[in-house]
Structures are given as C-alpha cells and as structure tokens.
Image (cartoon, rainbow, N blue to C red):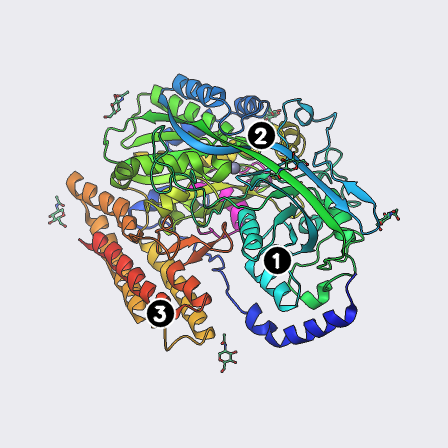
Amino acid sequence: MKSTAFFLAAAAAAAVHACDKEHHFRHHERHLHVQQPRSQLDDIGASKRVFPPALTAHERVLIDSFDNTTVASWSRYYTHKRNLAGESDIVPKWTAERWGEYGFETRLDSYYVYLDYPVHQSLALHYGNGSMWEASLEEEVLEEDETTGYSDRVPAFHGYSGSGNVSAEYVYVGRGSQQDFHRLQSLGITLAGKIALAKYGGPFRGLKVKNAQAVGMIGAILFTDPGDDKTMIPPTYPTYPHGPARNPTSIQRGSVVDLSAYPGDPTTPGYPSKEGSERADTGTIPRIPSLPLSWVEARPLLVALNGCGVDAETVGRSNWVGGIEGVEYSSGPSGARVSMRNMMRGEMKWIHNTVGIVNGTDGDEVVIVGNHHDAWMIGGAADPHSGSAILVETARAIGALLKTGWKPKRTIVLCSWDAEEYGLVGSTEWVEEYIPWLKDSVVSYLNIDVGVAGTIPDFGASPDLHALTTATAQKVIWPHGNNRTVYDAWEEKAGEIDGLGAQSDYAAFVHRAGIASIDMGTTRAPTDPIYHSHSNFDSFHWMTTFADPGFVMHKSIGQFLTLMLFHLVDDEVLPLEPANYGVEMRAWFQELEQLVSEANATADVQLSALDDAVSVFEDSAREFNGQRAMANSSAALRAVNHKARDFGRAFIGQGGLPGRDFFQHLIFAPGIDTGYRPVMFPGVTEQVAAGKLALAQEYVGKTAKAVLAAASILRS
Ligand SMILES: *[C@@H]1O[C@H](CO)[C@@H](O)[C@H](O)[C@H]1NC(C)=O
Ligand SMILES: *[C@@H]1O[C@H](CO)[C@@H](O)[C@H](O)[C@H]1NC(C)=O
Ligand SMILES: *[C@@H]1O[C@H](CO)[C@@H](O)[C@H](O)[C@H]1NC(C)=O
Ligand SMILES: *[C@@H]1O[C@H](CO)[C@@H](O)[C@H](O)[C@H]1NC(C)=O
Ligand SMILES: *[C@@H]1O[C@H](CO)[C@@H](O)[C@H](O)[C@H]1NC(C)=O
Ligand SMILES: *[C@@H]1O[C@H](CO)[C@@H](O)[C@H](O)[C@H]1NC(C)=O
Ligand SMILES: *[C@@H]1O[C@H](CO)[C@@H](O)[C@H](O)[C@H]1NC(C)=O
Ligand SMILES: [Zn+2]
C-alpha cells in the first residue's frame, strides 16, 4: 500500500493542470436530418402515412419472399460451427452454393494474409502476502445452450495481440483512452513497467492497448464491466441463460490491431495480399501482451486495488467507476502483482470472400451488399450471422424477383467477407485489389454485420443515403407494436443517422474509395436483453430465447436491406441525395468553428476557405437538383446519375490524414482515439485538438479543395 501523504500531494499538484488536460475534444454528436424525399424521389416516400405501407408489384414480391422460418434455418447453420478466420472454406463455399441456387453467379476471392491464433493464455494474481489466485479465462458451459460446450470452442483471446510473459504491479486505467492515461500521469501514478487493467467501452479495444504501450506499460487486461449494463442487472433481471442480464462469465474477445491507423492485413498496407506479395512489418500489431477478462474474474484484481493509488473521486473522470460490487475503482498500484502469459502463433493463411453477382443491364453502375462470415466463437448469432442469415434470404428474395423476368438495371454484387474480426481484412484486401473498378462503377455499398442485437433499428450512413434510408424504412413493417414501420421504431428511439467510422467492412469502401455507404442493423434499448458481444453467449439459443424469438426482426431488417438494394439497382433516377452532404457539412462546419474558437485558435486556423467551399457545394447541389428534375432523355438521366455516383470520390484526398495514409476521406474518419466513432473534418478537427495548428491550417486548404472538387463534379 502506498503512503497517503504522497498521493495527496500529487493530487493537489495535478489539480492545477487538470482543466487543461481534461479539455475537449467533442466528437460530432449525431444530427437529426430526416430528409423528406423530394423531386423525383417522391415515389419512394409516397407510402409514408398509409398502413400497411403501399408497395409496388416488385416491392411486394421482395417483401413477401422474406420468411422467418428460412431465415432461422440459415442462422442455425451459421451458428453451429467454428469459423474463425483462416481456418476453413466450408462456410464461404456453403454461402456460394445458396446464393447460386437463387441465380447469382458466384466465386471465392481468396487472399493470403497474416493472422494469429492462441497457443497459451494464463493470468494469475499474486497478493503481497504470498497467496495467489489464477483466472480460468473461460466462459461458463451452459446445459441450455449447446454451442457453449462444443469441444472445439474458441478460447478467449485477442486477435493480433502481442506474445509475451509479463509479471508486474498493475494499475486500473478506466477506459484506457489517451486522456485516462494522461490523467493518471498527471496525478503522479507511475505507469511505465506496469500492467494496465482497463474496462471495455469507449475507445476501440486496440487503441486501449496501443495507449498502454505508448506510456511504457508492459501488458494490458481488458474486462467487461456490468456498470455499462445500466439497469439490465440482477437482482431485477436474472442472468443469462435464466434471464436477459449479462452472464457474469462472459468474455469479449476481439482484435487489438490499431484500426485507426490501418485496417486490413497488417503486412500489406495499401495493396492486396497475394501469395507472392511483398510483406511489410506488422507495425500496427501491439508488442505488449493483452488478454480479455470477464467481470467476475476481473473482480479480484480490482478488489486488490481498493484504497491504493488515487481514489476514483480524485481521478474525477466520467464513467471511471463501474458497477462491480465491492470494488472502489482505485487506480493502484497496490503491491499485488499480475503475471500474465499470452502466447500467439502467427501464420500466413488463406481467407475466402464469397462473391455473388447478378449483372445489370447497365453494367457501368454497381451496388454492393456485404457482411462478414468469420466469428470469434461458435455462435455469433448476432455478430455476424444475423447479417449472414439475412444476406442469404436477400439472395432468395432477389431470386424470386428474377424468376418473374425482372432484370436489374445496375449490377448487384453480394459479398460475404472473411477475417473482418481481425481488422476488416477480407473486405480491405478486396477493395485494394479492385479499387479502380470500384471507383469507376460503384453507386453504393450496403453493409450489414450485427443485423439484430436489440429492438432499435440503427443506421450509420454517408449523408447522400439518408433520404433513401428513411424512405425505405417507411415501407417495411416492424414486428413490435401496433401498425408500426421500421421508420417509426427508428424515429422514436434513435431518430438519427450516425456517421461512419471504422466499425465494420464499409471502412475501405468509404475511406479509400469515397463510395456512398450505409451500415444497418439494430441496437439495444435499455430494457432489451444484454447482447454478449464476441462471447460464447452470442448464440443461437440466446437469439431464439431472448433477442429475436421467431426471427421477426431479422425478417424486417432483411426486407429493409432488400428494398434499399432494389431501389438502388432499379430506379431510373439514382436515389442518392448529394444535396444532403451540403446540409451535413454546414452543421459540421459550425461545430468546427466552435471547436477552433474554444481552443483559442482562431488566429492560427482560418476557416474561411472551407466555409466558402461548403457554400459553393450547397449552390452546386441545388443546381444539380435542378438539372436532375429537368433530365428528360436517357442520356441526360445517365449523366446526372453518374454525377451522383461520382461526386463523393472527390472527398478522397491523396496522401490521407496525418500519420494514417489509409484514411483518405477528408469529411469524416474514425477518431484517432476512438476507432469506432467518426470525427468530422478530421484533418482539421484532430490537429486543432492536438494543438498542431499549422497542420490544421494545411488541412483546411486540402479539405476545402476536396469539397470544391466534389461541387464541380455535380455542376459540370
Ligand atoms: C492474502 O490476501 C488475500 C486478499 O486479501 C486473502 O484473500 C488471502 O486469504 C490472504 N492470504 C493469506 C495467506 O493471508
Ligand atoms: C513464457 O513462460 C513459459 C513458461 O512459464 C515459457 O515456456 C515460455 O518460453 C515463456 N515465453 C517467453 C516469450 O518468455
Ligand atoms: C456478367 O458480366 C461479366 C462482365 O461483363 C461477364 O464476364 C459475365 O459472363 C456476365 N455473367 C452473366 C451470367 O451474364
Ligand atoms: C392497423 O391498421 C389496420 C389496417 O389499416 C387497421 O384496420 C387497424 O385499425 C390499425 N390498428 C391500429 C391499432 O391502429
Ligand atoms: C415465424 O413467425 C411466426 C409468426 O410470428 C411464428 O409463429 C413462428 O414460430 C416463426 N418461425 C420460427 C422458425 O421462428
Ligand atoms: C482560451 O482563452 C480563454 C480566455 O483567455 C481562457 O479562459 C481559456 O482557458 C482558453 N482556452 C484554451 C483551450 O486555451
Ligand atoms: C428536354 O430538356 C432540355 C433541356 O432542359 C430542353 O431543351 C428540351 O426541350 C426538353 N425536351 C423535351 C422533349 O421536353
Ligand atoms: Zn461483426
């Protein structure tokens, strides 16, 4: 135990600086810009107030084709076998067969990538008094939930983690954000040479490990904290499998690669991983070992820190205190030590993306739909197989429409990605291989990953897809409540469309190719069953018992996806709304102005060039809408459709963001210390936040230039 006097002094000294350190930066909070479909898009919103929604004959075929019983059968298949990335091509081949049966021309696009696998994981706590306790690192095997007991079940580990044995004192570091570490340092806690104990939530897990490594820590343990389950806790609610609350042994597996630097195979940054490809260092993989832990096994470690180091109140960071009983969330260290061992085996492996194609009559416009098929556990009923099951059913619905003689104008490409979980590997390598074709032809990329994990429809999308999203949501019946559509359920509980960070396979499409994209699914309401992310309890049994009995939300989300795809491939007028980029950019610009002003940087960072560029964009988008409304020949329509397809390419700035070449979209990017959540005008915003004002000014110029280039594509 440390002397109290030392810590009081350190805390007092730190308090003086605390306000600078704690300052900013705010991420873009989601805006509500529900777009009323307008001009030639009126037809897709016509059904708004009618219930049941009015549908065209083609829409009716698609909607009626969706069957919760077949969806359930696809889910059962996917959730009962091990499909960790790089281990087998059985699942992608099965997917190709199903899609083939419904009229898609299929193939596997395979890449030769670096992956790693767990060899030995252990963690022991050594109390100062000679006693020790060893963690099991295992999730409970449940009689009710058969896949939790499969003998080939996947151990709990971190993908792309550092190998090593370390033994040291440890420090509780909150969520493990840069600010958390800086706060502890400012309070006089020595971090170098110690092990970080961080809770999940907030920054992407790989960034927690990266941040720990950056301050000289030698290992990281990431645990799930039931405080983040808010009110969905015992004794009000029993724990899974007896009720909807979290099973205390649930462990969140996951990748710890540095996703805000570079997704994809770490050994081939910027180019596809072929068998003979040149290989770079695995610089985005942490050097220090890390392990995931359940809350029940994190408790002894946290209890041993009670009263040691800095107390939670002194740290004073929001969300620092979690919900584990008997834990004070003191920082430590305490004299207790952890020895942890994480032995990983790195290997070159084949991964397999399933690709299914139906040619459009107009081959120079393409719509891609994707989800991933690799999973961290046997199960994955929500992540990713609610998406996998929906995608097979989508193929079946399109097949039903093809049988009526319908042909899509634009080409449909379905993709089932491999190795998403390690770092969006399958999709990133594929985009890197096909980028010229993608930039020339792709109209939109529709992503579904966690298709169903709660009862609130949830969308993240580029601004030009907002109108189509809300219009489509109004055409699909939601299974819960009386006479409600997906739109009603979304508007009541979410009502906002998120921006796009790097949470799933849309990342390369957006950030490398500037393609209009959406990520869709559902998220939890506070009273929904806990979704055990990346745990054995994300299982078929959990899905059928708690999350979506009857697969009724699978059906709705699938219908939504399919109608959105249908309009994107079938409508004469491409249903994209470039003008909404103007609306969003104006709002983000105002936030940026405020950030610059709060940072007292108005003298060094002059935003007028960006302000003017956004105005030019707004004017050009209005002009474009006029041109589109008057397009009266197929040549004129084709020209406006191509502009709507192409203007977003201009947001891609050659060279990317400072220090991260991969992320080239100058309007939004995953936050450098969030990974998941997007930051708007990232080149400027993040440099202002970091105090690098000259660089921020440089990015004002680059961003303005990109916005003007997008405007000129619309106007030309
Ligand atoms: C050592 O300390 C731990 C934690 O306080 C306690 O559980 C254990 O019984 C102690 N062992 C001995 C030998 O005193
Ligand atoms: C870790 O420790 C084990 C035995 O405890 C040993 O076999 C292994 O070689 C060690 N690995 C490293 C990298 O030190
Ligand atoms: C689809 O188009 C591609 C490229 O033009 C062509 O190679 C392929 O044979 C076509 N497939 C079908 C089924 O027509
Ligand atoms: C739901 O819609 C149906 C069909 O339009 C209508 O008959 C019924 O009254 C509606 N129910 C409610 C609760 O609004
Ligand atoms: C499909 O939905 C119906 C009606 O909601 C339900 O009775 C049936 O059990 C569901 N099928 C499956 C396989 O869950
Ligand atoms: C900006 O200036 C004001 C007034 O001088 C000061 O109170 C504030 O702390 C400064 N903010 C930053 C981030 O430097
Ligand atoms: C089509 O639009 C063009 C340009 O707006 C106009 O000059 C032309 O008269 C229109 N043609 C018809 C048939 O409406
Ligand atoms: Zn996923």
> Are circles 1 and 3 on residues that touch, CB within 8 Å?
no
In space, the residues marked 1 and 3 are separated at their CA atoms by 32 Å
In space, the residues marked 1 and 2 are separated at their CA atoms by 50 Å
Indicate the position of residue 169 as horizontal and vertical percent values.
71, 53
**Amino acid at pointer 1:** Ala
Tag shown at residue 553: none
Q: Is residue 644 magenta?
A: no
Indicate the position of residue 451 as horizontal and vertical percent values.
52, 36
In space, the residues marked 3 and 2 are separated at their CA atoms by 54 Å
Instruction: Give the mark nearer the N terminus: 1 vs 2.
Output: 1
Instruction: Give the mark nearer the N terminus: 1 vs 3.
Output: 1
Q: Is mark 2 within 8 Å of ligand 5?
A: yes
**Amino acid at pointer 2:** Phe
Q: Which residue is mark 3?
A: 694
Segment tinted magenta in the rendering:
472-499
Q: Which residue is mark 1?
A: 192
Q: Quadrant of ligand 4?
A: top right
